[in-house]
């Protein structure tokens, strides 16, 4: 049923003629152990968030004091937990993808085929976790709007969560569309792989590289809106620090691409390498290097966009719909 991938002359795996379909169903089955691990991680994060809320050390409660009751707000906590496992899986699958399209496994004791399989299964799990995060947020909104009729409650939860531009309060006016952008881009960019025999491998490859945008949007959304990384303290620093290996691997991927055709060769040295192509490639490498430097500066300077923790609980809250 599944492909025996082989490498083309550029070092990129391509399907054997006649067996190019890597069945989505097969990958979904292979993703089960990975998804089970994600559920365990989500449960652990949920337990931690619950314990922090109960012990009075929750940053979510510091930002939104009315939430001081895990029994009532458990769906919100579960949404946060899925957000964190989703981000962790996104981190992992992006790292695997950059490794595959860049320097390859190198001395790692794992084959390219195994890395490709993990990349596919972890990306499927990531999509499911992102969706579960949004779904639990919608469920919490439906629970919260108890004064409305069922149809209105369902609509309010759905629209605030899934309709871009609908959520109209505070930071969420920017942060929620960023999250929606990540979710809505992740699904086609991830799943196009399974129809690449129809759209062509080159088109798929060109589109798939934009998946890095999904990751950037996810991190941006979290830094902007996550109450557990709200203040300029160590959890936020750790989140910034975790982006360093991704940026470093991106630089490496650009400097040592698996496909020979993507290397930075002088204009005219090979067919198709014109001055604009060369300039764009060189600019991409410089920009990726600048991101590494920027991340180091953010971590070293502590200017990470974190808010100051107020001495008194805040009068304003980020999710005003829940405070009305
Ligand atoms: C429809 C799309 C999305 C919606 C409506 C949404 C909604 C939210 C909300 C309301 C919060 C604030 C929770 C808090 O108080 O901390 C949040 C935080 C967060 N979101 Fe999303 N999000 C979406 C997409 C995503 C995506 C694609 C990711 C990537 C994995 C993500 C990861 C996170 C993370 C890690 C947090 C921080 C949670 C915390 O601080 O505990 N979100 N999101």
Image (cartoon, rainbow, N blue to C red):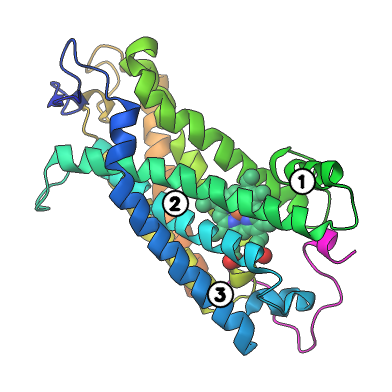
Mark closer to the chain start, 3 or 2: 3
Q: Nearer the viewer, mark 3 or mark 2?
A: 3
Q: Residue at x 27, y 36 (%)?
A: 101
Q: Residue at x 48, y 70 (%)?
A: 45
Q: CA distance from mark 1 to mark 3?
A: 24 Å
Task: Name the secondary structure under disc 2.
Answer: helix
Q: CA distance from mark 1 to mark 2?
A: 36 Å
Quick check: is 157 in the magenta stretch?
Answer: no
Mark closer to the chain start, 1 or 2: 1
Q: Residue at x 43, y 46 (%)?
A: 126
Q: Residue at x 15, y 39 (%)?
A: 112
Q: Could you say where residue 137 lies in the image, as x and y percent from the top left?
A: 66, 54
Task: Name the secondary structure under disc 3.
Answer: helix
- Image quarter hosting the N terminus: top left
> What residue is shown with label 3?
49
- Image quarter hosting the C terminus: bottom right
Is the C-beta of the residue carrying label 2 under 8 Å from the nearest atom of ligand 1?
A: no
How many marks the image carries: the answer is: 3
Most foreground residue, 121 or 74: 74
User: What's the magenta region?
Assistant: 303-324
Principal SS element in the magenta part? loop
> What residue is shown with label 2?
290
> What residue is shown with label 1?
160
Asked if residue 284 can be seen in this view, the reply is yes
Q: Could you say where residue 161 lies in the image, as x and y percent from the top left?
A: 71, 46
Side of 119 where 110 appears, left or right:
left
Q: Could you say where residue 87 lies in the image, as x and y percent from the top left?
A: 47, 55
Q: Is residue 272 above or below residue 90?
A: above
Residue 172: which quarter of the image? bottom right
Is the C-beta of the residue carrying label 1 under 8 Å from the nearest atom of ligand 1?
A: yes
Q: Could you say where residue 311 lies in the image, as x and y percent from the top left?
A: 76, 89
């Amino acid at each position: 049923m599944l492909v025996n991938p082989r490498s083309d002359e550029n070092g990129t795996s391509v399907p054997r003629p006649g067996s190019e379909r890597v069945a989505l169903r097969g990958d979904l089955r292979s993703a089960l152990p990975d998804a089970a691990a994600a559920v365990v991680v989500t449960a652990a994060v949920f337990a931690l968030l619950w314990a922090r809320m109960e012990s009075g050390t929750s940053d979510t409660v510091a930002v939104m004091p009315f939430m001081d009751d895990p029994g009532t707000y458990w769906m919100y906590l579960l949404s946060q937990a899925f957000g964190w496992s989703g981000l962790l899986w996104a981190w992992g699958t992006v790292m695997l993808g950059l490794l595959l399209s860049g320097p390859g496994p190198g001395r790692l004791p794992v084959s390219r085929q195994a890395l490709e399989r993990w990349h596919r299964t972890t990306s499927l799990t990531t999509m499911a976790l992102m969706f579960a995060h949004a779904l639990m947020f919608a469920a919490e909104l439906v629970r919260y709007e108890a004064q409305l009729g069922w149809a209105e409650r369902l609509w309010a939860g759905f629209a605030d969560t899934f309709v871009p531009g609908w959520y109209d309060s505070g930071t969420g006016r920017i942060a929620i569309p960023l999250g929606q952008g990540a979710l809505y881009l992740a699904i086609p960019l991830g799943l196009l792989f399974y129809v690449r025999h129809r759209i062509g491998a080159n088109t798929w490859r060109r589109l798939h590289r934009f998946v890095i945008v999904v990751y950037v949007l996810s991190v941006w959304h979290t830094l902007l809106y996550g109450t557990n990384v709200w203040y300029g303290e160590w959890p936020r620093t750790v989140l910034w620090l975790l982006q360093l290996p991704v940026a470093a691997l991106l630089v490496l991927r650009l400097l040592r691409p698996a496909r020979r055709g993507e290397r930075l060769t002088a204009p005219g040295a090979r067919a198709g390498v014109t001055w604009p192509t060369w300039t764009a490639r060189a600019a991409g490498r410089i920009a990726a290097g600048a991101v590494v430097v920027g991340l180091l500066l953010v971590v070293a300077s502590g200017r990470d966009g974190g808010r100051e923790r107020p001495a008194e609980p805040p009068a304003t809250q980020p999710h005003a719909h829940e405070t009305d």
